[in-house]
Amino acid sequence: MKCDDEEMILFATSIAMELAKGLDVDELEDLRNFVNQIACSISNLITRRYCVLKKKKD
């Protein structure tokens, strides 16, 4: 996904606003926890792929 920082921020904000429509505070907290878990999982995948690429170079 190629875009500059401003575009990424606007895109992420628009997604967040759509996901948050009609949710109460408790549901928003659940959504935040869910999104944070997705971010953690993606970070783990990036780290894993980096390690695999590094091993292939060695």
Image (cartoon, helix red, strand yellow):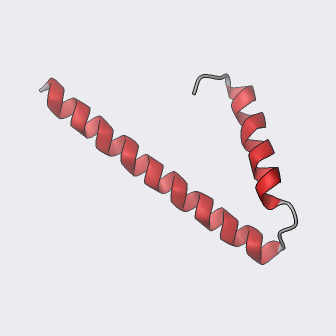
Q: Residue at x 34, y 43 (%)?
A: 47
Image quarter hosting the C terminus: top left
| Left or right of 5, for residue 20 | right
Is 13 above or below relative to 19? Answer: above
- Quadrant of res 4: top right
Q: Residue 29 location in percent, x, y?
A: 71, 70
Q: Residue 45 location in percent, x, y?
A: 38, 47
Is 17 above or below relative to 52? Answer: below
Give 19 or 6, whichever is nearer the viewer.
19
Q: Residue at x 22, y 31 (%)?
A: 54
Q: Residue at x 88, y 66 (%)?
A: 22
- Quadrant of res 32: bottom right
| Left or right of 58, for residue 53 | right
Is 36 above or below relative to 49? Answer: below
Q: Which residue is at the far left?
A: 58
Q: Which residue is at the far bottom?
A: 26
- Quadrant of res 11: top right
Q: Residue at x 31, y 39 (%)?
A: 49
